Amino acid sequence: MDNSLIIFLHGIGGYGRYFASVAKRWQQQWPATHFALPDGPFPFTQGEGFQWFDIDDDTPTLRNARIVAARTTFDAVIQQAIDQYQMTEHPERVALVGFSQGAIMALDTLTSDRCPYGAIVAFSGYLPVFTDARMARRTPVALIHGMEDDKLPWQHSQQTERALTQAGVNCELHLLPNVDHRVSVTGANLASDFLARIMR
């Protein structure tokens, strides 16, 4: 994975540094890979940390509209990391690794003709479905979800895997027993194995 960039995308109320331990382990595996751990662009309105889009008074319709509205600021955060590590001419060497809300935003790039990236790993997320959906079939995806997740049930990833597979996306699904709403060691290992295969 020489000359690659992995951008970690935290969940709601989180910080980029929440992925620091995973990044440290992966840095030992891939010393020539860059790692970016940005904070979301907006303060979390219900506590500490940051968010990629607002969830106040949330409904499915409102959430989809907010995800669409958040695309510009999300893309700006991604582009800043790409510019920082001089990867603008090599987007295929960039991977997005998101958790929960970060995973939702990463997967959203697939459906809006905004995904030139080499891989996406989505922990405990799902694919928002819009009428303008255009799948980026060239980007492989790994969906990793704990089966004890009480915030975003694992069925969200199962449904996402079906939609992506039907659209012709190279997608794999990993459902983890006895794992709740978090990035587990097992999940992180599955993600690193996936990235090693795809981004080699």
Image: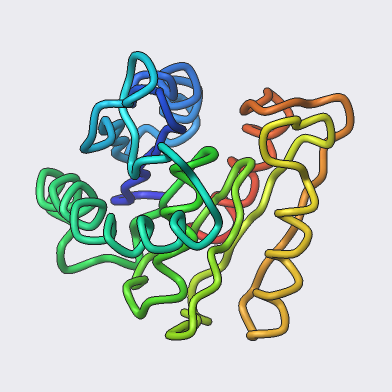
Q: Where residue 145 sits in the image (x, y, percent)?
A: 72, 41
**How many numbered callouts?**
0
> Is the residue 133 above or below the residue 179 in the image?
below
Residue 16 against residue 53 in the figure, above or below: above
Coloring scheme of the render? rainbow
**Which residue appears at 46% of the width and 33% of the height?**
11
Residue ID at (52%, 38%): 99
| Residue 160 percent across, percent down from the top left | 68, 64
Q: Is residue 134 visible?
A: no
On the picture, is 117 further left or further right than 75? right
Please state if 48 lies on the left or on the right of 75 as rendered.
Answer: right
The percent coordinates of residue 155 (x first, y second) are: 80, 52
Q: Residue at x 65, y 74 (%)?
A: 164
Q: Which residue is depicted at the point 26% across and 30% down?
A: 39
Pick the residue in front: 76 or 194: 76
> How far across and how far down the image is residue 177, in percent?
89, 32
Quarter of the figure with residue 10: top left
Give above or below for 168 relative to 139: below
Task: Return the residue nearer the eye: 152 or 143.
Answer: 152
Residue 184 visible from this viewpoint: yes
Residue reaching furthest front?
A: 57
Which quarter of the figure has residue 117?
bottom left
Taking the view exactly as shown, the residue that stands out farthest to the right is 177
